[in-house]
Amino acid sequence: MIQGGKVFTRFGLMALAGALQACGPGKPTAPQLTPAEACLQTVDPAAGLDACKAAITTDQNNPAFRRRVGLLRLKSHELAAARQAYQVAISMSSAYDAEAQFGLGLTLEAIGEPKANLKKLEAVQHDPTVVDKFRKYGVSDVDLMTFDTAPEIVGGQSPSADKSMIPKQPLPQGLTVDVRCQAALDGKLHDCIVTSPIKPDQAAFGEAAKAILATTKVRPARNKGAPVADAPIVLTYVFWPQS
């Protein structure tokens, strides 16, 4: 009985404490972020894009929101939209915008546009801290590399060899596949990954593009005349329906 009483008493005290807590001031809740704060504090496209859109509607001339849209679109591999956002940010900025310039360079590099590396290099020359900023955004060290001469294609296997690696699977229309590789000092490509969105039923074409493009021979990147190991290069392969 005594033990039972102790149990009852303990339970009664816990219930009383809970009741008192319920009557007293509630637990502090996290402050609600404004769209502007939410936009600039996230690097997750799923969470940030809507917030940035809302922020832009209230302040259309703030380049910071456009820069963040560019980053979020880039992380989603929506390259045309990322390019536009960064270009708008640059046009809005009253001074040199190293972050937008570097982001634009990253975007153009992902598209495979020649001389994109020079935009990144120029941004770093204006503000060396921009590299660490994008590292904190989750951009890989490979993509953060800077050099004044990008890797250059100098050769590859024959068209017949390419054809032998193409899947026999029917293809209803043309399919463009972008592949990013790293260029070693000996001109060979390695660590190739498919960057284009590929439908699950066309995954074989993504793997084939990666295998075909990995046979490309390149001249490695250079910076101030010195070769740069493992610089990124984006290559494209187009598959056509086979007759």
Image (spheres, helix red, strand yellow):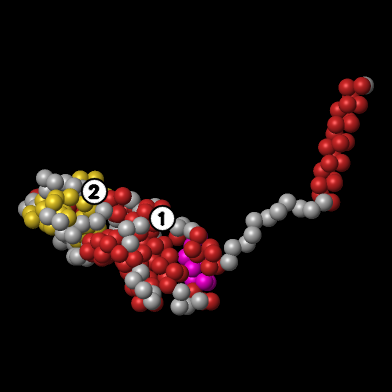
Q: Going 49% across and 71% down the picture, which residue do you hit?
A: 53
As drawn, the label of residue 198 is none
Marks 2, 1: nearer the viewer: 1
Crowding near the residue tagged with mark 2, few <14, some 14–19, many ≥20 C-alpha atoms within 10 Å: many
**Residue 54 belongs to the span the image colors magenta:** yes
Residue at 35%, 57% in the rendered image: 129
- Amino acid tagged 2: Cys
User: Can residue 200 be seen from the camera position used here?
Assistant: yes
Residue underneath mark 1: 137
Q: Which mark is residue 192?
A: 2
Camera-nearest residue between 19 and 91: 91
**Residue 120 among magenta residues:** no
Answer with left or right where residue 184 lies relative to residue 75: left
Q: Where in the figure is residue 224, as x and y percent of width and height? A: 15, 56
Q: Residues within 10 Å of mark 1 (few under 14, many from 20)?
A: some
Q: Which residues, given as a range, are shown in magenta?
A: 46-55
Q: Position of residue 103 (x, y in %)?
A: 33, 63
